[in-house]
């Protein structure tokens, strides 16, 4: 598994207060300005594999993490772990444990929701943030799985159904051009899905995470009070987080102070598919 064979990226386990163990990958100078990378639902820090080199070359200390339930981090069988406030606390504890505050954050999809909530509730922890197709800005198609997620039988059935081709097909749906996905990429996504606890964690996230977006006026009030610079990168062809572009426009109209950029033909995982372009826009904003 990544970063095997990558001498410039090093991994370690971090233990948070309460005993949660998270896998962290790091690259770049230890004295560089830290930049925290947070992945979306069902992914892992592998999503950021092509970001380490350009960000480190820009003088950044790059830190990516497997969120609870993902990658090689802990995957407790406890619904409360996967609720939005608990995941916000995990990121807050990680920032505090690593001495990163205030830290620049780049977050994709589900992690965008976590980051926005962190900014609203604890703005001192975040210096600036770039949100790539943040789930909290759109209507999320995972809602169609809610009836399945509520079934207790799913914990026993789903681990047997997660085959490599299913994981690969799901991954391809997040790209504008799926032909660019390599066999190694499919393996990296499939490998952690073979832990039965991974499938149980994904079911719990579908069931208990906050996928519904707030009224624009309400979120705008929180963001305006936090006064943390934000950039929303919105994929024009995001098929998972829908209607995010008009929602962000409504936030701006309500005075949220959020910048935005629509990426032509950008799909849901455009940060992974087009790392050079999206990381360049990110650095331009953060610097």
Image (spheres, grey):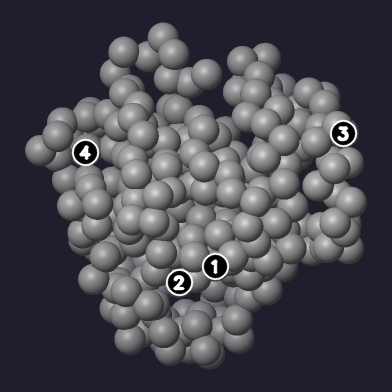
Q: Position of residue 43 (x, y in %)?
A: 59, 39
User: Which quadrant of the structure image shows residue 121?
Assistant: bottom left
Q: Which residue is mark 1?
A: 84
For the point 18% across and 52% down, the residue is: 99
Q: Residues within 10 Å of mark 2 (few under 14, many from 20)?
A: many
Q: Position of residue 193 (x, y in %)?
A: 69, 32
Element assignment for label 2: helix
Q: Which residue is mark 3?
A: 161
Q: Residues within 10 Å of mark 3 (few under 14, many from 20)?
A: few
Element assignment for label 3: helix
For the point 76% across and 31% down, the residue is: 167
Q: With 77 as the anchor, is 217 left or right in this view? A: left
- Between the C-alphas of marks 3 and 2, the distance is 33 Å
Answer yes or no: do the residues labelled 2 and 1 have beta carbons within 8 Å? yes
Nearer the camera: disc 3 or disc 4:
3
Answer yes or no: do the residues labelled 2 and 4 have beta carbons within 8 Å? no
- Between the C-alphas of marks 3 and 4, the distance is 41 Å
Nearer the camera: disc 4 or disc 1:
1
Ranked by sequence position, the earlier of labels 3 and 4 is 4
Q: With 114 as the anchor, is 172 left or right in this view? A: right
Q: Which residue is mark 4?
A: 60
- Between the C-alphas of marks 2 and 4, the distance is 25 Å
For the point 49% across and 61% down, the residue is: 87
Above or below residue 64? Residue 168 is above
- Between the C-alphas of marks 2 and 1, the distance is 8 Å
Q: Which residue is mark 2?
A: 117
- Between the C-alphas of marks 4 and 1, the distance is 28 Å
Q: Which one is in front, 214 or 157? A: 157
Above or below residue 95? Residue 147 is below
Most distant residue in the front direction: 19
């Amino acid at each position: 598994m990544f970063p095997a064979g990558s001498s410039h990226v090093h991994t370690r386990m971090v233990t948070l207060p309460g005993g949660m163990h998270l896998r962290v990958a790091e690259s770049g100078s230890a004295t560089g300005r830290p930049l925290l990378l947070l992945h979306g639902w069902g992914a892992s820090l592998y999503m950021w594999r092509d970001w380490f080199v350009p960000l480190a070359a820009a003088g950044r200390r790059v830190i990516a993490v497997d969120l609870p339930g993902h990658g090689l981090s802990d995957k407790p069988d406890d619904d409360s772990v996967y609720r939005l406030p608990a995941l916000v606390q995990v990121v807050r504890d990680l920032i505090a444990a690593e001495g990163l505050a205030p830290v620049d954050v780049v977050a994709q999809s589900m992690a965008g929701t976590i980051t926005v909530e962190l900014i609203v509730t604890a703005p001192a922890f975040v210096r600036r943030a770039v949100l790539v197709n943040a789930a909290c800005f759109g209507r999320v198609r995972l809602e169609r799985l809610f009836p399945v997620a509520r079934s207790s039988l799913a914990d026993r059935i789903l681990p047997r159904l997660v085959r490599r081709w299913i994981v690969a097909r799901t991954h391809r749906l997040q790209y504008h051009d799926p032909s660019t996905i390599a066999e190694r990429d499919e393996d990296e996504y499939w490998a952690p899905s073979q832990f039965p606890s991974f499938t149980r964690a994904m079911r719990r996230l579908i069931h208990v995470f906050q996928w519904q977006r707030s009224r624009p006026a309400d979120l705008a009030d929180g963001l305006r009070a936090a006064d943390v610079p934000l950039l929303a990168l919105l994929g024009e062809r995001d098929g998972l987080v829908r209607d995010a572009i008009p929602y962000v426009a409504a936030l701006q109209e309500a005075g949220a102070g959020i910048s935005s950029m629509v990426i032509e033909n950008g799909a849901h995982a455009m940060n992974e598919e087009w790392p050079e372009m999206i990381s360049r826009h990110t650095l331009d904003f953060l610097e």
